[in-house]
Amino acid sequence: MKSEQFIVIGLVVAILIGIVAVFAASGDPDGLESTALVVQEQKALFGDTPEEAEIHEEEEGRFAYESPFPDYSMGEDGGKMGELAVIVLGTIIALILALAIGKCAKAKKS
Amino acid sequence: MHIPDAFMPIWQGGIYWIIALIFIILALKWARNELTEDKIPMVAVLSAGIFAIQAFNLPVGFGTSGHLVGGALVAILLGSPYAAVFVLTLVLIIQGIIFGDGGLTTMGANILTMGVIGGYIGYYSYQGLYRATKKVYLSAAIAAWLACFIAALACAVMMWLAGTFPLVPGLVAMGTYHALIGIVEGAITAGAIYLLLQARPEFSETVTGVSAA
């Protein structure tokens, strides 16, 4: 497979994975968040995560930053379309950034 | 396993950033020496694919979900743990800055667990397992499971040092959940290596070490 063809197919597959993720990804907390809930005694190690469980976060002496698209969304108004847009955007940025840094940093010999 | 800013004092994040920067510099040196023109498309596709698939949380039971991290996948395919540091750093920068997934002060820690530890454990355990068994996909799956599991334990220790988790309960819960998430990591890593080698058979030399002298 030619490089250009591989990049295009790879990008399309990545975007498709992202699109499926928007609709099918599990909303359960990830391993780190689940552990936080367990040690904060909001969840049993082998139990389900209760609806009302919420991670208590330390704020004092911690850095806080508001990203443009928190939680891979455009907020409440953006809905699923907003989530689709940002996941596609992120995937394309990842590809372009890797190509650009790769070209700059690449080995001289071939 | 993306540590948010709120989970770690800023000064500790700074220490992990300094250590991570050393590995980032080494990863850029790797790129200068090893990242030839023909490998750049693979690095780009892996970056895009890992970014997308990290948004795809799969349920693993016990009210918990997990996704592929991908450090082992990159390191095995490109034949170096530094390739994993390169790709994971790039993905974590995009996730942290644009999507608030993983903190900024904790990004160094996240690069260390997922990129450095994930890449090193993934690469060297794959090399050992492959030499012993000659089975590419089995070795890759086990190596990826180990990469996920060990990175999670390292993350639990960081969380203990940060005062966020107590040591033993943190290790037990992180270990339990990531032993399960590691199955996702192992299965997708083996599947992705299979598909990517179909598209780019020239990388099988790196994976099977035929001419990787």
Image (cartoon, coloured by chain):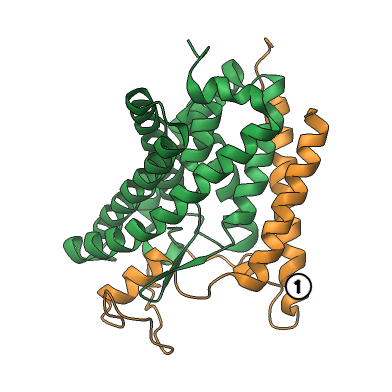
Chain colours: A orange, B green
The image shows residue A100, relative to residue A60, as above or below, that is above
The image shows residue A106, relative to residue B92, as above or below, that is above
The type of residue carrying mark 1 is Gly
Q: Residue at the bottom extreme?
A: A52
Can see residue A68?
no
The image shows residue B22, relative to residue A28, as above or below, that is above
**Badge 1 is on which residue?**
A82
Snapshot quadrant of residue A43: bottom left
At x 53%, y 72%, the residue is A26
Which of these two is toward me, B179 or B25?
B179
At x 37%, y 78%, the residue is A56
The image shows residue A79, relative to residue B157, as above or below, that is below
Count the labels in the image. 1
| x and y, in percent, of residue A31 in the image | 39, 64
Q: Residues within 10 Å of mark 1 (few under 14, many from 20)?
A: some
| x and y, in percent, of residue B115 in the image | 46, 41
